[in-house]
Image (cartoon, grey):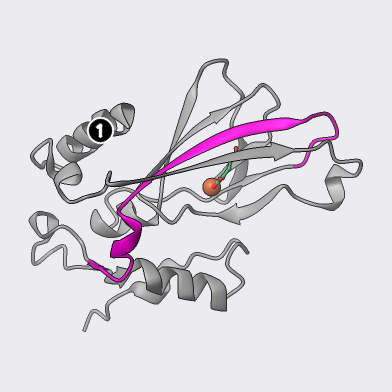
Amino acid sequence: MSLGFTLYELLSEALGLNSSHLKDMGCADGLLLWGHYGLPCPEPKQTIASSSHCDSNFITILLGDQMGGLQVLRQNQWVDVPPMHGGLIVNIGYFLQIISNDKFKSVNHRVLEKNEGPRISAACFMRSRKDQSSRLYRPIKELLSKENPPIYKFSFDDLLCINNLSKGLDGTSSLPHFKLSRT
Ligand SMILES: O=C(O)CCC(=O)C(=O)O
Ligand SMILES: [Fe+2]
């Protein structure tokens, strides 16, 4: 939580906002921790541990082991994220992209299977409170101008619904569904 608060302060300042802006918006009110345990896979080329997706939250702080396997999509190429002892990986999720009006971009990532193992990782998702899932999120108004009109509007329930209706973790972004028309 305390690392998350520091990151939010830096991210708020990077957006030209007061350092407490993202925390005051409630972006750190909910914390979800997932522990991943992947068994060695006999045929790693035939499957994938976690298919291409962006996280449905503001930021994710990820602790991995020495196995590697995580990749991020950069300029349409999958790039390995090398394991780093004691290092933490911070991913930007859909919510931060939406409220920053595309100033921060969520990162598409996936995890490849390994035939050695097990592979262990812990993902800490920073998000708003679960009971606020119907709350509507829009870009932060201080970031908007005539030249930068709002791009999105959405709630967490909308995002879940779209992810469930579409293939969800199929690598296609859910964001276009939340675009406001720009007429
Ligand atoms: O295990 C990893 O390295 C990534 C896990 C992940 O992307 C997730 O939990 O959303
Ligand atoms: Fe993820």
Residue 20 in sight: yes
Q: Quadrant of the C terminus?
A: bottom left
In terms of image quadrants, where is residue 112?
A: top right
At horizontal 25% and vertical 33% (from top left) the residue drawn is 5
User: Where does the magenta region start and end?
Assistant: 113-137
Q: Secondary structure at mark 1?
A: helix
> Around disc 1, counting alpha carbons within 10 Å, would you say few (fewer than 14), some (14 to 19), or many (20 or more)?
some
Residue at the location (19% across, 45% down)? 22
Q: Specify the amino acid type for callout 1.
A: Phe
Left of 61 or right of it: where is 131?
left
Residue 172: x and y, percent? Answer: 55, 65
Coordinates of residue 137 in the picture (x, y in percent)? 24, 65
Per the image, is 119 magenta?
yes
Q: Does residue 126 sit above or below 117 in this rendering?
A: below
Relative height, residue 27 to residue 150 (above, below): above
- Residue 105 in the image: state x and y as whole percent: 37, 50
The quarter in which the N terminus is drawn is top left
Pick out the residue farthest to the front: 131
Would residue 101 be visible to someone looking at this image?
no
Judging by the rendered image, the residue that carries numbered circle 1 is 5
From the viewer's perspective, is residue 149 above or below residue 79?
A: below
Residue 109 among those drawn in magenta: no
Depth check: give the residue in front, 76 or 54.
54
Q: Residue at x 27, y 81 (%)?
A: 181
